[in-house]
Amino acid sequence: MFTSGQTAAGVTVPSTKPGLSLAQMAGQRVIYSYTGLTPPASLLSSIRNGEVGGVIFFSQNISSQAQIASVIAELDQADASPQNPLRSSPLLLMTDQEGGLVRRLPGAPALSEKQIGESADPAAQATAAGTGAGQNLAGAGLNVNLAPVLDVYRTPGNFDDQFQRSYSMNPKRSPTWARTSSPRSKPPGSRPPPSISPAWARPPAPRTPTSAR
């Protein structure tokens, strides 16, 4: 978790933009979620007022690529409101598109991290998974992928292993394959390292959320 002025992986988290209200300064550090397929009017209003750092989407918010693309277009339109002092900085729109069992959007990547780690050529499979995830998210208008996960499972059948969210029990292998996948899994214009806070995720801009969930 990073706050204004700190750096990570060569990315400087910018200072708060002058002239913001207290609600805007607080809101730019909050990632919102909602239930169902339609974003509530209150969320759209908060986005128009510059009081939202980003939105995270779960399976309950997505019925198809076309549906979520329509939702994201609506959120982007609210973000572009003239009354939003942060409209020049993209709203963070994110999901967990890890692959395998953990996919919020239909489509790539098909393989889980465990399947990639057990494949004959994990590096090539990780590259393909990252490329597919980035293209898939970009096609829907998302700009942050909260993946790949760097967890190293310790016990077969535990949470990470049960849902195939870990490449390996070997702590030296998981980061290697994640690095291969990570740069390719991000939609164009974003650059977060694997499975981290959106404070790392956006290019330098006034909005600086410090926690994904």
Image: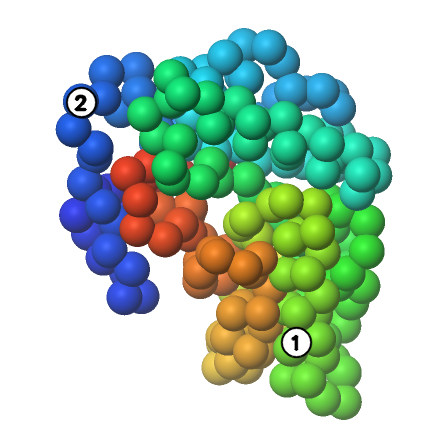
Label at residue 126: 1
The type of residue carrying mark 2 is Gly
Residue type, numbered disc 1: Ala
Establish if 93 lies above or below 33: below
Q: Which residue is mark 2?
A: 19
Q: Is disc 1 surrounded by few (<14), some (14 to 19) or many (20+) residues within 10 Å?
A: many
Q: How is the image coloured?
A: rainbow
Relative placement, left or right, of 34 versus 171 is right
Q: Residue at x 32, y 25 (%)?
A: 85
| Residue shown at the point (71%, 20%) measured from the top left | 38
Point 54% across, 17% down: residue: 44
Please state the horizontal and vertical placement of residue 144, each as a whole percent of the image: 53, 50
Give coordinates of residue 73: x percent, y percent. 64, 32
- Secondary element at image label 2: loop
Find out whether the residues at labels 1 and 2 contact each other: C-beta distance under 8 Å.
no
- Of marks 1 and 2, the one in the foreground: 2
Mark identifier at residue 175: none
Please identify the residue farthest to the front as the structure is shown.
Answer: 82
Label 1 vs 2, first from the N-terminus: 2
Residue furthest to the bottom in view is: 120
Report which quarter residue 7 is drawn in. bottom left
Measure the alpha-carbon separation of dots 1 and 2.
Answer: 44 Å
Residue beneath the point at 64% across and 68% down? 130
Q: Relative to 10, is 107 on the left or the right?
A: right
Vertical arrangement, residue 122 with respect to residue 168, above or below: below
Q: Is residue 134 above or below residue 67?
A: below
Q: Is residue 182 left or right of residue 26?
A: right
